Amino acid sequence: MYSIILAGGSGSRLWPLSRDLYPKQLISLHGQYSLLQNTCKRLENITANAQNVLITNIKHANDVKFQLRQIQNNGIVLSEPMGKNTAPAIACALAYIKSISDKDESVIILPSDHLIQDIKAFEDTVRNAVPAIEKGNIVTFGIKPSYPETGYGYIKTGEGNNNCYKVEKFVEKPDYDTAQQYLRDGCYYWNSGIFAGKISVLQDAFKTNAPDIYKNIENLDFTENLSIPYSVYEKMPEISFDYAVMEKTDNAVMCVLQSDWNDLGSWQSVYELKEKDKDGNVTEGNVIVNDLKNSLIYSSKKLVAVSGLEDIILVETEDAVMACKKDKSQDVKKLYERLEEENKDARLIHKTVFRPWGYYTCLAQGSGYLTKIISVSPKQKLSIQSHNHRSEHWVVLEGKALVILDGQKHNLEAGQSIDIPLKAIHSLQNPYNEELRIIEVQKGDYISEDDIIRYEDAYGRV
């Protein structure tokens, strides 16, 4: 069985921890690994003889590849030039699998940002769905609801047996009273967004129900490039797989997911996941509380002190603080949308940004300048690059630096500095055994991460 892992979302409901350029699937919210890495590890037995195919936005592709290398996973990463929802992404990934396999294989399709801890129960569920897949059905996986959730879509089921049922219809996110009725009825399940089927069945479903998508993928060629051409993708409609295919097909069945499941789609769902103290609180980081009940308080650095409150979410990061009522945590997306409308950088990126070679932290920014601390891990190096709009000045704080500047090597120690002129070809490298930390001051008429021309890179980002 192949897998298609959808890794392109923005995670807007988990702002400010999740950002547009570092969304929730790349973050470790529970345990050692990120949600993306956990998804790949969950599939190790299911796709042991096939391959994981991940599809993500081009702006996340390098981070996804880096995280795969960390867990020694050889998955293929397809990059889409823009977000078009799940239907075009799945169609392109199916076309890729078809191009590398001459057999009519089975495929499981799943988001990268779910948390499932009972891996054996998950594997058993997928295994139990195989007979339905072999009969030519498209299988979706539903979760027995435990409370009247208004943030999920639902699946209404018909006749069936052995935890596998005919799908009668898909239902949009309900209001609270309707969700309560669904809970009482017993034939409604939460829609997990996980699907499975044969390649031929899935492609025929696109051909029949979404021809405007299918006609654009017929001539895709992946032999030289795993980036989907803009000229192809811009013609795609922006539509989910549920709308484009599942709600129209007549061969949809639902298997009940036997494992635990959490889509971590809001701060409340993160709260529900975490272990609570005697007052029902979850506190992480530099936090002091008094007379607090049933709340989540998260601090990344600053001291956060809270007193006399109940049922709240409060999240502090280096550059933002977000607070809301716990039962209104779905509305964090509205704050994110306001930031987008006002073009605020706080929706895009953290003050501290992790890279394959280490990380950098933005200290100060103004008109025509930006100051960072850059930390380069031992034996790592930045790409050989140049900038068209900015010059840079580097001062070594700790460790030793090897600087390549227009083909010349410069060895710098703590306290020494070097200027990187506009358009100069350069690289910052740390071939030593200790961490390297420098201050970088950028000056120019345009200060942005997209002002980088890469000529050579150890992490495949050229």
Image: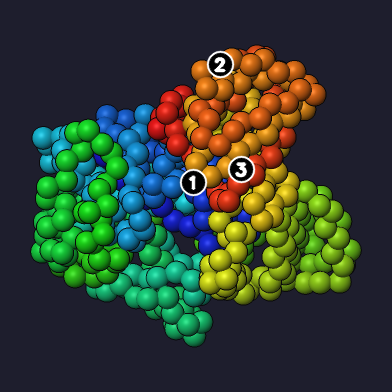
Q: Is 405 located above or below residue 125 in the figure?
A: above
Q: Nearer the viewer, mark 3 or mark 1?
A: 1
Please name whichever residue, 434 or 169, is drawn nearer the observer in this view of the structure: 434
Query: Which amino acid type is shown beneath numbered disc 3?
Result: Val
Tell me the CA gap for discs 2 and 3.
29 Å
Residue at (35, 34) in percent of width and height = 75
Q: Are marks 3 and 1 in contact (CB under 8 Å)?
A: no
Residue 58 in the figure: left or right of residue 386: left
In the drawing, does residue 220 fall left or right of residue 188? Answer: left
**3 or 1: tag closer to the N-terminus:** 3
Q: Is residue 298 above or below residue 370?
A: below
Task: Judge depth for marks 2 and 1 and give the one in front.
Answer: 2
Q: Which residue is mark 3?
A: 353
- Which of 364/393 is in front? 393
Q: Amino acid at mark 1?
A: Asp
Res 77 visible: yes
Q: CA distance from mark 2 to mark 1?
A: 25 Å
Mark 2 or mark 1, which has the lower sequence index? 2
Label 3, label 1: how many angstroms apart (C-alpha)?
14 Å
Tell me the tag on residue 347. Answer: none
Mark 1 highlights which residue? 450
The 10 Å Cα crowd at callout 2, few under 14, some 14 to 19, many 20 or more, is: few
Q: Position of residue 230 (x, y in %)?
A: 27, 52
Q: Nearer the viewer, residue 84 or 169?
A: 84
* Residue 206 found in image quarter: bottom left
Reading the image, the residue beneath label 2 is 408
Residue 422 horizontal/vertical position (percent): 56, 37
